[in-house]
Image: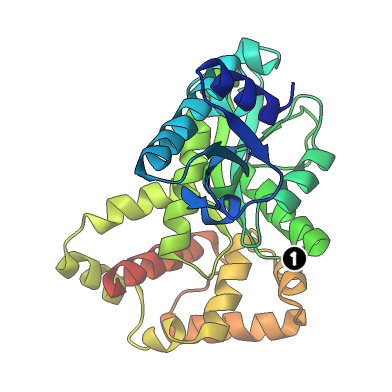
Amino acid sequence: MKVTEIITERLKSFGLDVAFEEASDCTRRGDVYSDGGRTYFAVPYGGEAYAFSIDGDGDTARVAAALARECAVAELAKSGAVDPVRAFLSGDGDTAAVGVRVGKFDYYVFALYGENGATAVRDYISAMSGADDLVADMSNGIIAFCKKVDNDSDYQSAGEFAVVLSENLAEEIKEKIRIGVGGVAHGTAELPRYYAYAKSALVRGAEFDPKSDIYSYKEYALIKTLSELSSKDMDKFVKTVLDKNYRAVLDDEELMTAADAFIKHSLNISEASRNMYVHRNTLIYRLDKIEKLTGLNIRNFNDAMTFRVACLIDKIMRG
């Protein structure tokens, strides 16, 4: 049975003379309004909105329409029409309803958001998913993606997979996609918790660092810890680990873009330069300049991590 038929049938059983509307402003406006002797309301479901109307256009009709909308949403959930994967990842369902194999399988867990809407992102993710992967429309245009980790996986971490996924999405659907990385869930029972991590990373990351497109929950746990330091201690750390000319790097968008790309691509010059569309010698020149101004050679892992933490603290201090 179609969603619209479920809603119409349920509301009519409650004595409401409700009609489905193929096209109505309320699906765009998302509110209750009256026009031509009828009152219209929209019922959200699965990233879409379905318009209905009841007879009457006074205050009583508008109240009835608002109550009908809430009733329809509740009935959809009760009838099982709501996507079971969405319900499970939101903490309102179980693995039996989802239909995945229960066991200690590992999953990379992500929350994705496309600036031009969820449909293209969902379609691409669904097309490239395996039989044991989970994909669902969540709230506010976010797509959940749980990728089962195979024993012969080419990826070392969820973050590495996210980088490749981001590049493929940008190439295929030609829009900026933001990805929250929840990490690795060890077993299906952990998927709701790690999806919550991924969503939190996505939301916080977009606020903290809008220029980036991949946000790790583990990094934002670090940011939360760093933000609890006093301003005096944060300032002291930055000035201790970076040479006095460090501001020339932190204020230089070109140098910071080079540093971010280099660190994101696991300190691999070839991968970073390819992703930046610059010659590797250009990237090397910029890394040398960063070392000269900060005293840190970020081609060295320890120096790269020190530089990254210093940059995070500087962003926190700048608000």
Q: Residue at x 41, y 32 (%)?
A: 67
x and y percent of residue 244 in the render? 32, 86
- 92 or 212, nearer to the observer: 92
At horizontal 52% and vertical 23% (from top left) the residue drawn is: 190
Q: Against 112, is 70 above or below?
A: above
How far from the left and from the top, in percent, is residue 138?
57, 39
Q: Three-letter amino acid code at disc 1?
A: Glu
Is the residue 266 above or below the residue 105 in the image?
below
Could you say whether the residue bearing mark 1 is in a helix, strand or loop?
Answer: helix
Quarter containing the C terminus: bottom left
Which residue is at a point 60% across and 84% down the rendered structure image?
A: 286
- Write down the residue under mark 1: 271
Q: Position of residue 42 (x, y in %)?
A: 55, 43
- The 10 Å Cα crowd at callout 1, few under 14, some 14 to 19, many 20 or more, is some
> How many numbered marks does the figure carry?
1
Q: In the rendered image, which quarter is residue 246 located in?
A: bottom left
Q: Is residue 249 left or right of residue 168?
A: left
Horizontal arrangement in the rendering, residue 141 relative to residue 57 (left or right): right
- The residue drawn where x is 75% and y is 79% is 280
Quarter residue 21 falls in: top right
Q: Is residue 291 above or below residue 89?
A: below
Q: Position of residue 126 (x, y in %)?
A: 78, 39
